[in-house]
Image: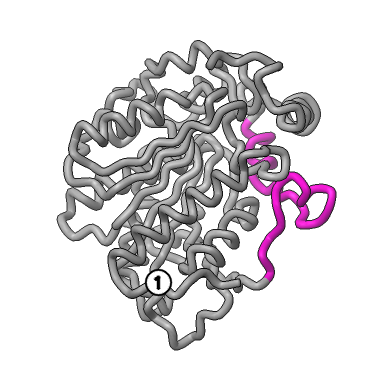
């Protein structure tokens, strides 16, 4: 589908217009100071804001930790533990979550609604990675941060009180790119604990060759102009856009963990997800691809304004549970 204002669900069109024309400036028109100020933005967990973003599940405990990266940086982690899981329970698996924001914006707190939902419904410890952002830290720093965070999680099951032999990745947009890159890097080590990767409208091709980038160039919440700006801020000058550290589509995909790829039909990055799913399948990797119609990029973060949100979340939770619990301890059912 090609973007048209009339293709969106009416309430999705309303919130998209508010976000695009009232609440934030496009990345291509922001100064570095404005970008840095935006990074601390968090939507309040109360109506009317939570009618759009969803509520934070207060039954889920939230704590903090750090993981040391290969260059000695202490990487902040936001850790979610579900209700009904005692401190002595170590059979719960782990979901490592990687937030979106074009490698430039975003923070871990703004994803509390989704991460608490995943912790409660998947019945897993969720570890959200506060990776370093561009342009202060250009790629592949963020990809290495995420990879090092997953390796740290795998080695600290006792500290997390979880079974870190069963780790799933869940990445949103730029986080989908970083999750896909990390899955490849960990596969190459030969001892990857990752049993599943859930990629939510991931960016997978920095060459910008996907047809949807032209078809949906002026779509809400993410435009082609913004994609180009994000790429220029993230990737070093003179980068090879086909480098798998930047574009996981061009990496070796054989032997990767099974994947769920969810795309938005009115998203410039739609075909990045479709092409990656097709490439995974061609490499022999089990993959489930679902394209959600009449929604734009970023729809996961505005569930209250997307009629298909319940379906998207049920699919995401179901796939994570199926792969995490098939890989180890028997499933007990979701908390709450």
SS at circle 1: loop
Quadrant that contains the C terminus:
bottom right
Q: Viewed as shown, does residue 7 lie left or right of 232?
A: right
x and y percent of residue 59 in the render? 65, 73
Q: Which residue is mark 1?
A: 331
x and y percent of residue 104 in the render? 54, 37
Between 306 and 128, which is closer to the camera in this rendering? 306
Q: Is residue 19 above or below residue 321?
A: above
In reply to whether residue 36 is colored magenta, the answer given is: yes
Q: Viewed as shown, does residue 285 lie left or right of 215?
A: left
Q: Viewed as shown, does residue 215 lie left or right of 249?
A: right
Between 191 and 326, which is closer to the camera in this rendering? 326
In reply to whether residue 1 is colored magenta, the answer given is: no
**Residue at left 55%, top 80%?**
84
Q: Viewed as shown, does residue 160 lie left or right of 265?
A: left
Q: Which residues are magenta?
A: 32-58
Q: Is residue 309 above or below residue 55?
A: above
x and y percent of residue 241 in the render? 33, 23
Between 181 and 54, which is closer to the camera in this rendering? 54
**Residue at left 60%, top 52%?**
111
């Amino acid at each position: 589908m090609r973007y048209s204002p009339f293709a969106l669900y009416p309430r999705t069109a309303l919130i998209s217009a508010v976000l695009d024309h009232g609440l934030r400036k496009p990345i291509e028109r922001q100064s570095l100071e404005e970008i840095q100020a935006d990074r601390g933005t968090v939507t309040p967990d109360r109506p009317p804001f939570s009618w759009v973003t969803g509520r934070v599940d207060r039954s889920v405990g939230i704590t903090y930790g750090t993981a040391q990266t290969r260059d000695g940086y202490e990487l902040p982690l936001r850790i979610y533990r579900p209700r009904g899981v005692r401190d002595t329970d170590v059979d719960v698996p782990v979901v490592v979550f990687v937030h979106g924001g074009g490698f430039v914006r975003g923070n871990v707190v703004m994803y509390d609604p989704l991460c608490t939902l995943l912790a409660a419904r998947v019945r897993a410890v969720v570890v959200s990675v506060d990776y370093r952002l561009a342009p202060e830290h250009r790629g592949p720093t963020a990809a290495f941060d995420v990879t090092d965070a997953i390796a740290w999680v795998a080695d600290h099951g006792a500290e997390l009180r979880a079974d870190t032999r069963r780790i799933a990745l869940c990445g949103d947009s730029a986080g989908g790119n970083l999750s896909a890159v990390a899955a490849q890097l960990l596969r190459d080590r030969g001892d990857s604990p990752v049993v599943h990767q859930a990629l939510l409208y991931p960016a997978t091709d920095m060459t910008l060759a996907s047809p949807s980038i032209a078809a949906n160039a002026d779509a809400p919440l993410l435009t082609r102009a913004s994609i180009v700006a994000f790429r220029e801020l993230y990737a070093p000058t003179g980068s090879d856009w086909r480098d798998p550290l930047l574009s996981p589509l061009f990496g070796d995909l054989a032997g990767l963990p099974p994947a769920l790829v969810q795309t938005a039909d009115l998203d410039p990055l739609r075909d990045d997800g479709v092409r990656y799913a097709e490439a995974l399948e061609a490499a022999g990797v089990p993959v489930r691809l679902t394209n959600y119609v009449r929604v734009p990029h970023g729809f996961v973060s505005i569930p209250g304004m997307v009629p298909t949100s319940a379906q998207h979340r049920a699919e995401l939770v179901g796939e994570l549970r199926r792969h995490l619990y098939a890989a180890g301890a028997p499933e007990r059912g979701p908390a709450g």
